[in-house]
Image (cartoon, rainbow, N blue to C red):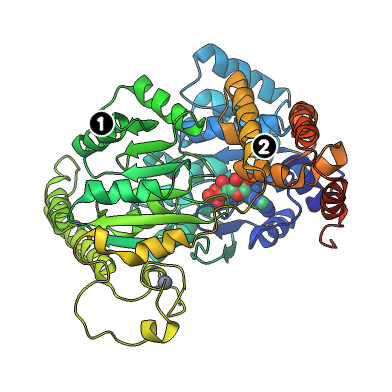
Amino acid sequence: MNGQNKYEVLQTYFGYSSFRDGQEELIDSILEGNDVFGIMPTGAGKSICYQVPALMFDGITLVISPLISLMKDQVAALNQAGIYAAYLNSSLTQGQYFKALDYARKGKYKIIYVAPERLLTESFLEFAIHANFSFVSVDEAHCVSQWGQDFRPGYLKIEEFLRRLPKRPIVGAFTATATREVQQDVVRLLQLSNPKVITTGFDRKNLSFFVLHAKDKKTALMRILRTHYGESGIIYCITRKLVEEVYEMLAERGLEVSRYHAGMMDDERRRSQEEFTSDRTQLMVATNAFGMGIDKPDVRFVIHYNMPKNMESYYQEAGRAGRDGEKAECYLLYSSQDVHINQFFIENSRDNEELDEETLASVIEKDRERLKKMVFYCHTKFCYRKYMLNYFGEKAEQYCGSCGNCIGKPQAENMQTRQRNQPIYNADVTDSGRLLVAVGSKKKATFNNPELYEQLRLLRNRFAKELQVPAYVVFTDKSLKEMSTYLPVSRAELLEIQGVGQAKCDKFGQAFMDVISRFKEEHDVSPTKVQAKARVLSQPKKTRT
Ligand code: ADP
Ligand code: ZN
């Protein structure tokens, strides 16, 4: 084990001063040598759960991950944090692949990301059998299950791979998928050995949910966008054609917007995705092909231009908002037309799959059932959050206080059975005073000095461009907001900012502090104010044991 304890590792490399719900328990269990199964919603911070132990174990940690784009970004983020990591997947040329493998053999990497399909290849197995793996982490573990919508046959190879190793490493599986069948499959198919299962619950408290029954979706969309000016957001449409239409409309109005769907060329799609993750555009209009594996923590809103086919998809897609833990909004624009489109997809999209008639019929039946529950969601007059959590088998309060059905409504009213048989957002969105209340009441200015924030953002984006990494890999918005609020001008102060670890402080710190110092001088920040900030910064962190 390396000499640092888990808190030191968290602070030194990731710049965080405390663990979030579930993280510490999982990490402790891994460090004790147990297999674990972490079931946590998107944004909960699953990566930290295997990255911290990875840095504490003597050997290598292998991370099995389904998505090439995700691996690349994760490795970039680790490298910027001063951690030796690499990925092995089909995006490498053969030359690059063997070179990386060679470095891996020489012990250059602490963390290696690999695609499941590669595990049983001769070259990889040969390396693996001689490597010292302490820990194997299976990301997006639900991909092993045929129940889920993201089934990846490659995941079925993991278990055999583990068996082929001379010594079985500790295995951790992680997923955000809530359904029981999938969870059971993960334990069974990966052959987790008496795993410690930790679920943190699926409630994403920082997200607020809204459903709008809009006659004119374009108008509704524009109204929502106006309330999110300057923020990053994703707009999901059900068909490629709609993506194009909405994209055109937004581009015509001069908005900085990207688009993404499976009908585009590979590199066109890649460019588009990069525009968005590097903050060159703020809006992404996409089909559901977009998002899996995109780690952009500061997405402030997700709009579903159409109702998705089930709650699972909705929760997953809407959940791409607010991964940084800051407040974010999820809107669904509903029309009865959406139901018909989804019905059509359910009846017609499985032609190519090799399912016998009976299985096919039962699959379609299940899909219909799920669609029905999705439609009920759109029409419920009660708390949307509660509906969602109950759907995933969790208990919830009657009243969340922040969704479209709870806001502006006294708790008592929400708990009564409403007699009127109409949704709250009936008719046109223009009638919907409640949404405006919701958005208007949002506290936007949670940080000071927006002007400085903008300067820091530009600097951050310049670094990102130069290093060819997503913007958040340099610093997240949250870090920049804290900087523009607390104005750190020394190394010690900067290290107190959330998300600033040693390596990033060394690499980028001076440039950011220069901007902050200049800002302070120009704006003559009064000594008392500076002292107040300094006091805030020098306050001891939470006691650690
Ligand atoms: P998940 O994989 O569960 O969706 P991630 O691992 O991508 O979530 O983490 C989501 C965000 O939360 C990331 O920006 C990550 O850096 C941040 N994060 C994770 N753990 C902590 C923590 N203990 N304190 C503050 N931020 C954290
Ligand atoms: Zn609610």
> Does residue 288 sit above or below 334 in this rendering?
above
Residue 15: percent from the left, percent from the top?
A: 74, 44
Give the number of the mark in front: 2 or 1.
Answer: 2
Q: Would residue 334 be found to the left or right of residue 496 on screen?
A: left
Q: Residue at x 25, y 28 (%)?
A: 263
Q: Which secondary structure lies at badge 1?
A: helix
Q: Which residue is drawn at 54% across and 53% down?
A: 444
Mark 1, Cα crowd under 10 Å, few <14 / some 14-19 / many 20+, is: some
Residue 478: percent from the left, percent from the top?
A: 63, 46
Split into quadrants, the picture shows ligand 2 in the one at: bottom left
For disc 2, does the CB lie below 8 Å from ligand 1? no
Q: Nearer the viewer, residue 117 or 520?
A: 520
Residue type (three-letter) at the residue carrying disc 2: Leu
Q: Decide which of tag 2 and tag 1 comes sooner along the chain.
A: 1
> Does residue 416 sit above or below 153 in this rendering?
below
For disc 1, does the CB lie below 8 Å from ligand 1? no
On-image quarter of the N terminus: top right
Q: Nearer the viewer, residue 66 or 14?
A: 14
Furthest toward the top, the residue is 95
Q: In which quarter of the image is residue 378?
A: bottom left
Residue with the mark numbered 1:
248
Residue with the mark numbered 2:
452
Residue type (three-letter) at the residue carrying disc 1: Glu
Residue 523: percent from the left, percent from the top?
A: 75, 37
Q: Quadrant of residue 535?
A: bottom right
Q: Would residue 235 be found to the left or right of residue 400 on screen?
A: left
On-image quarter of the C terminus: bottom right
Mark 2, Cα crowd under 10 Å, few <14 / some 14-19 / many 20+, is: many
Q: Nearer the viewer, residue 224 or 329?
A: 224
